[in-house]
Image (cartoon, grey):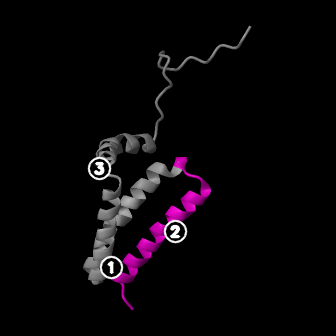
Amino acid sequence: MPPTPNPSPTGSDQPAQRAGIRPRIERASTPALTKLAALPTVLPFLIMFAVLLVGVFLGGLIGGLLLLIPILFLSWLLYLTWPHLRRSERLLRVAVLLLVLGIAVTQIIPR
């Protein structure tokens, strides 16, 4: 006789929802990601690149604070995609994030 699958605690055939902060963040991010996916593929990249360039060339405190926009955006995307990335992809994305963070810090705190 084959083993029977364990019934879910909710009594339905669907698996129980995961608890924790990640599913809540993923659910809260769904509307924004849907709107982002509807845009032309290159547009979010160009916008973030433009904000990054303005922040770098503007310099000082304002430029450094402006760099927080790409830092937060990249951090959000990295958090959402982390479980699906290979080690090399994670390493590259963390390196880019740290590079932008380093630029922001040197803008805010000059020599």
According to the picture, the residue beneath numbered tag 3 turns out to be: 39
Q: Nearer the viewer, residue 64 or 9?
A: 64
Q: Alpha-carbon distance for marks 2 and 1? A: 18 Å
Q: Residues within 10 Å of mark 1 (few under 14, many from 20)?
A: many
Indicate the secondary structure of the residue bearing disc 2. Answer: helix
Quarter of the C terminus within the rendering:
bottom left
Instruction: Work out whether 73 lies above or below 58.
Output: above
According to the picture, the residue beneath numbered tag 1 turns out to be: 56
Instruction: Work out whether 109 lies above or below 77.
Output: below
Amino acid on which disc 2 is placed = Ala
Residue 94 placement (x, y as % from top left): 51, 64
Residue at coordinates 37% horizontally, 39% vertically from top-left?
27
- Queried whether the magenta region covers residue 97, the answer comes back as yes
Q: Which residues are magenta?
A: 83-111
Which sits earlier in the primary sequence, circle 2 or circle 1? 1
Instruction: Work out whether 56 lies above or below 51.
Output: below
Which sits earlier in the primary sequence, circle 1 or circle 3? 3
According to the picture, the residue beneath numbered tag 2 turns out to be: 95
User: What is the quadrant of residue 88 in the picture?
Assistant: bottom right
Give the mark toward the camera: 2 or 3: 3
Residue at coordinates 72% horizontally, 11% vertically from top-left?
2
Taken as a whole, is the magenta stretch helix, strand or loop? helix
Residue at coordinates 40% horizontally, 43% vertically from top-left?
26
Q: Alpha-carbon distance for marks 2 and 3? A: 26 Å
- Queried whether the magenta region covers residue 37, the answer comes back as no
Give the mark toward the camera: 1 or 3: 3
Extreme residue in the top direction: 1
